[in-house]
Image (spheres, helix red, strand yellow):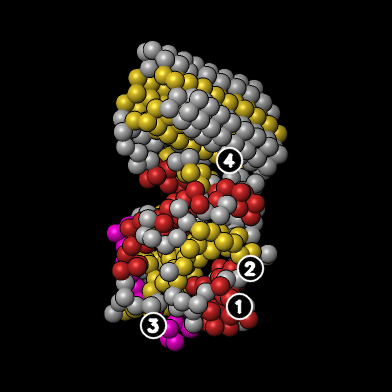
Amino acid sequence: MKAVILAAGEGTRLRPFTVSRPKVMIPIGNRPILEYVVRALAANGITDIILVVGYMKERIMSFFGNGSQFGVKISYALQEKQLGTAHAALTVKNQIKDDFIMVAGDNIIDAQAISDLLKHKGNIALLVTDSEMPSKYGVVQIEAGRVVDIIEKPDKGESNIISTGIYRFPPSIFKYLEKGVMEGKSGITHVLHSCISKVDLEVVRSTGRWMDAVYPWDLIRLNEYASDLTGQEIAGTIEGGVTLRGPVHIGAGTKIKAGSYIEGPVAIGEGCEIGPYATIFSTTSIGNGVSIAPFTTIYNSMIMNNVSIGSHSHISRAVIDDGCRIGSGLSAPSGMAQVRIEDEFFKVEKAGSIVGEFTQIGSRAVLSSGAIIGANSRVGNGVKVEGTFEDRSIVV
């Protein structure tokens, strides 16, 4: 059976992390979101995969190549303009001859989720799950184990059961998608809503993992769930006086200097320099080429590649993108915050700070809970940052 992964979108609500990468390539636990999907399919023996790409397609294609390093065979289809999931699905119409699996590439899933769908005997089925934010997804109405309606992003969800975007489809689905797109329907859920009486769409509930990030602060939640490390894997250098507790994975060429304390699960990439006397607490991921200076403490955060953090800094529940340079004495706590995204305001519990790529932050700066700093920005020494700042902002 073939699988089609839809990976053409940008993910605008996750800016600034999608400025130079598609949502599917945001690293969670030091792996792109899309890698979790590919590995879940491979674990179920589905090795013939078509990736539908579009926005920043080169980032995807250069990382996954032909799929051989993941034990699969990957081919690509191009959605030149991002006109919705129904339009994206039609790009593979001529490559599908039999029943197939269709998966959204921007959610973290595990092998069990795919296994549950494969066990289902019907030839057209939808994997569903419960959500605390059903209005952000396609809400599914069910009767006698069959879908009677799907309502995309309703103002008020009548149910908390949502579509995961994981389907088992026969080739005949393309005639409905084609008709729907011609009528101006952009998404697969919009198309299914219009033709639900004509397709016998059955529901599959899964015991597997399905997680989505809608907003930047959701990435911390995904990172927590992806931190299912076991044991300790140490490929780098550990100096004397270092304490490692719980599952800690450290990449080749990384040096953990004397007196540092790391409490897992923690994943640290290659070529990093940590400490001396740095402290890193659980469910933190640190990418490649990261430098963390002495007496800095990091809690439950995502530090991406080639980031430099100065000494005596305190960081909690933050997401810091590639190439950021942060001076000494940074204070970036977490707590309740009102956060603005695309002219909407959200009350977020345990909100940390969000820092876009290649941003420079001076010494003794304070990032208030829920602060968002766009990519390529500059923050001066001793500045307190509150609220949301666009890309290339200068805060003094």
Q: Quadrant of the rendered structure where residue 89 is? A: bottom right
Mark 2 or 4, nearer chain start: 2
Mark 3 or 1, nearer chain start: 1
Q: Is residue 197 magenta?
A: yes
Secondary-structure class at tag 4: strand
Q: Please give the name of the residue rendered at 68% of the width and 31% of the height, measured from the top-left corner.
A: 378
The answer to whether residue 10 is above or below residue 187 is: above
Give me the C-alpha separation between circle 4 and circle 3: 45 Å
Residue at mark 2:
83
Mark 4 or 3, nearer chain start: 3
Secondary-structure class at tag 3: loop
Residue at mark 4:
372
Which quarter of the rendered picture does the N terminus lie within? Answer: bottom left
Give me the C-alpha separation between circle 2 and circle 1: 9 Å
Per the rendered image, the range of residues in magenta is 193-208
Mark 1 or 4, nearer chain start: 1
Q: Please give the name of the residue rendered at 53% of the width and 27% of the height, measured from the top-left corner.
A: 271
Cβ–Cβ below 8 Å for labels 2 and 1? yes
For discs 1 and 4, the disc positioned in front in the rendered view? 1
For discs 4 and 3, the disc positioned in front in the rendered view? 3
Q: Is residue 324 visible to the viewer in this orientation of the structure?
A: yes
Q: Please give the name of the residue rendered at 32% of the width and 64% of the height, measured from the top-left corner.
A: 116
Relative horizontal placement of residue 349, taking residue 273 as reference (left or right): left
Q: Please give the name of the residue rendered at 39% of the width and 44% of the height, measured from the top-left corner.
A: 226
* Residue 10 coordinates in the image, percent (x, y): 60, 56
- Crowdedness of circle 2 by 10 Å Cα count: few (<14), some, many (20+)? some
Residue at mark 1:
181
Give me the C-alpha separation between circle 1 and circle 4: 36 Å
Q: Amino acid at mark 4?
A: Ile
